[in-house]
Structure formats: structure tokens, C-alpha cells
Image (cartoon, rainbow, N blue to C red):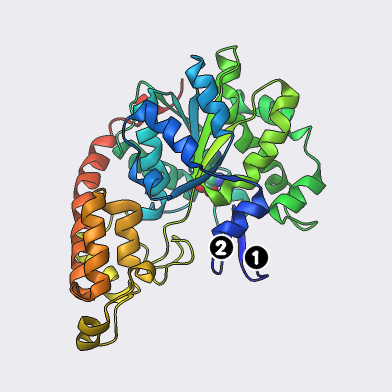
Amino acid sequence: MKKDNIVTPWEVKGEVDYDKLIKEFGVEKISDEILKRLKKHTKELHFMLRRKVFFAGRDLKFILDEYEKGNKFFIYTGRAPSGSVHLGHLMPWIFTKWLQDKFNAELWFQFPDEEKFLFSKKMTFKDTEKYLNENMLDIIALGFDPKKTHFIIDTKHADLMYKPACEVAKKITFSMVKSSFGLNEQSNIGSIFYTSMQAVPAFLPSIIKKKNIPCIIPHAIDQDPHFRISRDILPKLGYYKPASIQCIFLPPLTGTKGKMSSSEGYSILTTDNKKTVKDKINKYAFSGGQPTLEEHKKKGGNPDIDVSFQYLRMLLEEDDKKLEQIYNDYKSGKLTTGELKKYTIDKINTFLKKHQKEREKAKNMIDKFIYK
Ligand code: TRP
């Protein structure tokens, strides 16, 4: 990857080249054989699998082998409270919900509320506490089953987590962390310790239930360095290596190559109203259309670099046939950029209307999800 193209858990800069990341990180593309085996159990494949939005992983074969032997896995994922939730965050969680439903699996959802406190100069614990609450609502709103879903919050569950984290930390040297995360002599020592906390939920259920349980972690590919280390350490402590299934990033409105980020004022937030969504898409969504309508009708647009189309493909349009029709019509010039944007705006607003209603209801449910 070029020098100015950076992908770490704390920074994604420049164009992301996923094939190069696969090589650099040493993850495996999800093979057709794995997809076939998954499909045997799930009947339909989630569109994010069909469209290679979830495109890579580690040890998926192991997870399926164990599952087929009757050794069920649990799911682990997480969110560091640090700001408002945007559409890009929802992508892996929507998939996680599907995985939970299809495999009737327990989900352990970590909220490392110290992570952004440690890694960002400005963030205070007062901020993270506010976002923790807000972020939990977004996750509950997606419909996770409270009976099978456990939220663990690093500072609240410190009594459960600190010992296992120390077990992990004892096996990690500063030089391992430096090379995996780009930390250096000037990094604060909390940030150096942090990855041991993110390793804990991958084996905490095994500790609690006093038996080894396989773990699968759905996550965006930038989190892989954490779990590469976890996979190294956990067998040394007597646990399975956690498996993972990894997705690409939902691009920012301004172009198809990077990652949607809360720090940009124009990311689409789950709390945005209809008009805000409309304005953001109309004003910022990068278009693969031609400069004039006339030219567009003649030459056609390019859906592959069109952000609205990519949002439909990755997140909003479940129907393959409909998506294909939009693709073809846009390419031929029959569908204009204005029409494509309008369709996307309506899809987002329909989704958000339901999400915001569920988010309201979630306010009385937080307690049911927090692990006790
Ligand atoms: N580090 C993640 C973030 O910045 C939060 C997280 C913790 C996580 N555990 C995880 C993400 C497991 C994916 C899977 O938001």
C-alpha cells in the first residue's frame, strides 16, 4: 500500500486497496466453498455475503466444522463509544444480527468506553459516557434478541475483565504492539495496554461457562490487527483462536474509496431527519453521472464509482434484481443521477424512520442488555 494510504484501527487514510490489505494482514478471501457451506445452514445468503461486502475472514472453516459437530459458536463484536452512529457503523451490525438469527447464537457486544478516551486527545470520560448511551440505543434498535445478547462495558465490567486482560497483556510485548498498531515511544501507556481489553470478549464466555466455546468476530477489516494478536495469544492461555468475518468500509459521501467517518460533517447519522438526509445526498454524494443530462442520456453513467449506487449495493437494496436493473439503467443513461439520488434518499429515509422509532423504544431496554 502507498505510504499515504493507511489502515489501522484508529486511522483510515487515502484509497483502500482491499486486495493488498488481504495480503498485508494475511486474511483469507471468503471462498465459494465456504459460502456454499454457510448457505446449507442459513438457506439464503445475506446480500452482504452475496455481494462480497463481507469478503474476508479467518478460520471460517474451523467455525463451520465445529458447528457441524454440534459445537456451537458465540458471536463477538463491539463499538467504542466516541460519537454519533452513522450508516457505515450499521453495516457490520446488521450482518451480525442476521448471523445471530440464523445460527441462534449468543452475541457478546463490547463497548470499550476507555478506547477513544485513551486514543483521542480531546475525549473525556464524560463524553464517552454520553455516547455510550446513545450508541447502545442504535444497536438495540437493530433488533438483537435481549435473551441472547450481552453488552459488556469495559469500565463497568472491569471486575470481570481486568484479570483476563492481564493474562493477555503478559504475553504481549511493546514491540509487538508498536509494529501492529503504529504506536511509538511517545504513545501513552493506556493505549499500549488497550488491545488486551479488546481480546477479552473473545474468551470471556468460555471463562464464564467454564468450557471452551468457539468465537466468531464480525468486523470491518481495520480491526484485524487486534485479533491477529488475540489469535496469537489465546491458544497460549488454553482457548480457541477467535475466527473472524470481515467487511469493507461503507465509503464516505465524497467518493467510493475511503471510509465513512463521523469527523466529516456530512456523514449520514442515524438521528438525521428527512431533510438533512436529502440535503446531504444531493449536495455531497459523489456521482458517476455525466456533467450534463444530454451527455448522460447519450453516454450513460458509471455505477461503480457512484456513491449512491454503492450505498444501495452495500446496505440499502436487498433485492438483487432491482439492484441489477438500477445498475443497467444507470449505465445505459436511462436513469439519471437525480433519479438515482432520489431513490437512495427515499431508501435511507424509509430505513431511518423505522430505526428512529425502534431507537425510541430502546430507551427502556438498555438494562435488559447489560450483562449481569
Ligand atoms: N475498536 C472498535 C471501535 O473502534 C470497538 C470494538 C471492540 C470492536 N471490540 C470489537 C469492533 C470487536 C469489532 C469487533 O469501534
Query: Residue 359: percent from the left, percent from the top?
Result: 27, 42
Q: Nearer the viewer, residue 79 or 163?
A: 79
Query: Residue 318: percent from the left, percent from the top?
Result: 26, 48
Residue wearing tag 2: 17
Q: Secondary structure at mark 2?
A: loop
Q: Which amino acid, mark 2?
A: Asp
Task: Say if 209 sits above or below 28 in the image.
Answer: above
Q: Nearer the viewer, residue 235 or 133?
A: 235
Is the CB–ligand 1 distance for label 2 below 8 Å? Answer: no
Q: Number of numbered discs present?
A: 2
Task: Say if 51 sits above or below 366 in the image.
Answer: below
The residue at the far top in this view is 210
Is residue 298 in view?
A: yes
Residue wearing tag 1: 1
Q: Secondary structure at mark 1?
A: loop
Q: Nearer the viewer, residue 184 or 327?
A: 327
Residue 8 shown left or right of residue 95 in the figure? right
To which quarter of the image does residue 238 belong? Answer: top right
10 Å neighbourhood of mark 2: few (<14), some, or many (≥20)?
some
The residues tagged by marks 1 and 2 sit, at their Cα atoms, a distance apart of 7 Å
Query: Residue 9: percent from the left, percent from the top?
Result: 59, 52
Q: Residue at x 48, y 50 (%)?
A: 127
